[in-house]
Image (cartoon, helix red, strand yellow):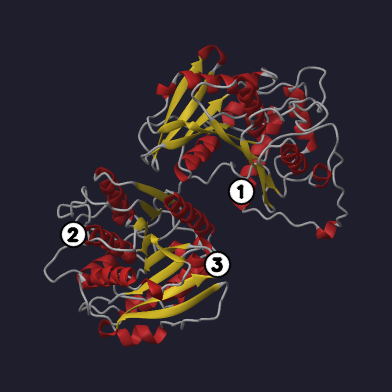
Amino acid sequence: MASTRLKTKPSQTPKLVLPWMTRISIYFLSKVTDNASRSNGTVNRRLMNFFDRKSRPNATPVNGVSTKDVTVDANLNLWFRVFTPADGGCLPVVVFFHGGGFAFLSPDSFAFDAVCRRFCQRIPAVVVSVNYRLTPEHRYPSQYDDGEAVLKFLDENRAVLPEVADLSKCFLAGDSAGANLAHNVAVRVAKSGLRSIRVVGLISIQPWFGGEERTEAEVRLEGAPLVSMRRTDWLWKAFLPDGSDRDHAAVNVSGANAVDLSGLDYPDTLVFVGGFDPLQDWQKRYYEWLIKSGKKAQLIPYPTMIHVNSSPPPPQPMPASTKPILPWKLRLKISVLSFFMNASRRSNGTVNRRLFNFFERKVPSNANPVDGVTTSDVTVDPARNLWFRLFVPSAAASLPVVVFFPGGGFAFLSPDSAPLDAACRFFCRSFNAVIVSVNYRLAPEHRYPSQYDDGFDVVNYLDQNGAVLDNIADVNKCFLVGDSSGGNIAHHVAVRVCKEKLGLVKIIGLVSIEPFFGGKDRTESEIRLTQDPLISLEITDWFWKAFLPNGSDRDHEAANVSGPNAVDISGLDYPNTLIVVAGFDPLKDWQRKYYEWLRKSGMAARIIEYPNMIHGFHLFPDLPDTSLFVSDVKDFIAKQVAR
């Protein structure tokens, strides 16, 4: 197949934009591998190993993931690292083959340990990261032999994996050279078969294929990071049998020497392509060849990404004294909001409503679609100003319902506040769900349990008045979602729903976004993390005093939900829960205690931490981690709907 020739002027070529830390990491990695690659075709292992930082296995969960190493053949140094998430239940198994041109890196390299830990946590799945032999000391087909041997070992030694691992739902995955390896192992498995393992999918992340021909992308993107024709030529020469060229079946998998897949049970395949990857033409040919061979495949392009964008070394964890790095515009917005909230909090425990309302910008509902979302306000009880704002996306299908409780320390903001209206509009569009944003009564004018009463009454109202929702809303697929104090409300409303039962509304999930919990004890994160611009000990103490019944302390069941006065939920049908934690949130220790308490109570729960984020980060769509947050919540909703 001839490559497509694009007549692109230099001025039309998009510019690659990378953060400066990423550029430094890539530059450093490129220099190390270049200097370790000798002109005689060998590798300076001493040099490479000096710079290749290793991570040890850790049986103690780190960010909800534990790891262990399992030896397959000590003589071949063939082993794998198992990554197990703290989530319970039956989980798929992802057998991952790392990249590195068949010549560099391993599962315990810092970068790949971090990548697999992230995959394990966010999929979630049990990840098996394979340490195969490296070239040029071990040429083709050693790497394919090792990959197949690991699968056969797992097939015959199920007990080495955790009990939650389901080998009937096994995926092969790899990036760069690892994706090449995954393809060739998939072919071998399809030919030989396995006893208990069933490979149901293949994830090919910017696979490393090639050929004697120089494609348009290879020529045009010769200056792209990490991959160049000089580097790939050196690596292919080090990997292939002596005397072979790049049209060998291991390299040009869709070329003249390609294996015939038409009669094989080859797994469904997902191919990821980076727009700045010089190998993209070969990757697209691989996808087209799979389709022509009668296989199911999907290609997903990332136009502005480079080769191996999935696995450059992640940033180091920030020291405790380091401030969160935020864009200056965001810092300004947060500072303004924080200033007016603090100015409105009186020392006597009351709120200057006139002052705060003067500066709080309100947004009316709009029946005309804005960014594909219409809004309307529905009154539940005018006597207590109980109402909700309904956000409906432009969609014809049946959609889940998200009952959203906004944050604000129980004392500030409402669904028509400009930031919360924008956030719910964004959530509605991103989650593809009908959003019900609840206007509950505020403290200190209305203390506990007013907010919980209002939250439950709105859910009960929807149960009895389903017609107020759009026809596409499916109340049998209902989620409770809240951020900060709204996350606290969502929890307590969920407990009430479990106890009092509903007719039509079925709560199938809860998303607790940086929930506002606390207690009399001062946790390590509350003392250490003093740089969050919205949350401090002084502020949270004021909120709890304004919210809790007079004479109560912070170990009240409303605040310390997992403490000495906690409600016993072990016998309740409490919904599956996703807990979102920000690394710079002083409340994160309480949020982790909530997660641990749910698990000890026999509930299904998952926790995801965004290490470099602050309390309330999810309200700002321009932050990169907000996109990850949306993707994680969307995945959670989809999985609960599919159950």
Q: Is residue 72 above or below residue 233?
A: above
Question: Label 2 sits on what residue type?
Answer: Glu
Q: Where is mark 3, residue-wise?
A: 395
Amino acid carrying label 1: it is Thr
What's the CA distance linking mark 2 and mark 3?
41 Å
Q: Which residue is mark 2?
A: 557
- On the image, the x and y values in percent for residue 299 come to 67, 46
Whole-number angstrom distance, CA of label 2 to CA of label 1: 45 Å
**Left or right, 371 with reference to 444:** right
Label disc, if present, on residue 22 of the rendered structure: 1
Q: Give the mark nearest the N terminus, 1 or 3.
A: 1
> Residue 347's x, y, as percent?
23, 78
- Residue displayed at 49% across by 21% down: 155
Q: Quick check: 95 left or right of 553?
A: right
Q: How many numbered callouts? A: 3
Q: From the top left corner, tell me how far across and down residue 634 is, in percent.
A: 48, 56
Q: Which element type, helix, strand or loop, lies under badge 2?
A: loop
Q: Residue 489, located in which quarter of the rendered image?
A: bottom left
Q: Is residue 142 above or below residue 210?
A: above
Task: Return the disc, 2 or 3, that comes first in the chain's sequence.
Answer: 3
Near mark 3 (Cα within 10 A), the count class, few <14, some 14-19 or many ≥20, is some
Closer to the camera, 15 or 398? Answer: 398
- The percent coordinates of residue 145 (x first, y second) are 62, 19
Residue at the extreme top of the image, as rendered: 75
Look at label 3 and name its amino acid. Answer: Ala
**How busy is the neighbourhood of tag 2: few (under 14 within 10 Å), some, or many (20 plus)?**
many
